[in-house]
Image (cartoon, rainbow, N blue to C red):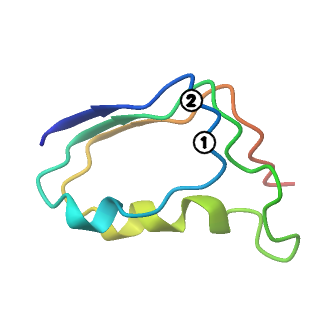
Amino acid sequence: MMTLNLSHNRIKHLEGLSCLPLLKNVDFSNNIIGANSDLDNPLSCIEELKLCKNLTSVDLSNNIIDCD
């Protein structure tokens, strides 16, 4: 699989992406990623993306991720 579009699905965190080694493009826009994330590490909800070495495009727009 090279492209995965999971926009508009009320997804809260990402997991299971490491089993998709050919993944190049992902669209997780318009979800609720970041809701209930770890206050000490607000980016923990997207850490799984680091395991996808071939990613070239990631859309996380319109989510609740807070890096402040």
User: Residue at 26% across / 43% down in the picture?
Assistant: 56
Q: Position of residue 65 (x, y in %)?
A: 74, 46
Q: Which residue occupies 56% across, 59% down?
A: 46
- Label 2, secondary structure: give it: loop
Task: Name, please, the residue furthest toward the bottom.
Answer: 40
Q: Check disc 1 and report its element: helix, strand or loop.
A: loop
Q: Foreground: 55 or 26?
A: 26
Q: Reply above or below: 1 against 53.
A: above
Query: Where's residue 51, x and y in %?
Result: 33, 70
Left or right: where does residue 36 sit relative to residue 8?
right
Q: Using residue 67 as the reference point, say whether residue 19 is left or right of it.
A: left
Left or right of 43, for residue 17: left
- Label 2–label 1 contact, CB within 8 A: yes
Task: Kindly identify the residue that appears in the image at 33 percent across and 59 percent down.
Answer: 17
Three-letter amino acid code of the residue under disc 2: Asn
* Circle 1 crowding by C-alpha within 10 Å: few under 14, some 14–19, many from 20: some
Hey, what amino acid is under mark 1?
Answer: Ile
Q: Where 41 falls versus 65 (above or below)?
A: below
Q: Residue at x 56, y 29 (%)?
A: 9
Image quadrant holding the N terminus, namely top left
Snapshot quadrant of residue 54 = bottom left
Residue 13 position within the rendered picture, expressed as x and y whole percent measured from the top left: 61, 55
Residue bearing the label numbered 1: 11
In the rendered image, residue 49, in percent from the top left (x then y), is placed at 42, 60
Quarter occupied by the C terminus: bottom right
Label total for image: 2
- Marks 2 and 1 sit apart, C-alpha to C-alpha, by 5 Å
Vertical order, 31 against 36 (above or below) = above
Residue annotated with mark 2: 9
Q: Is residue 8 above or below residue 55?
A: above
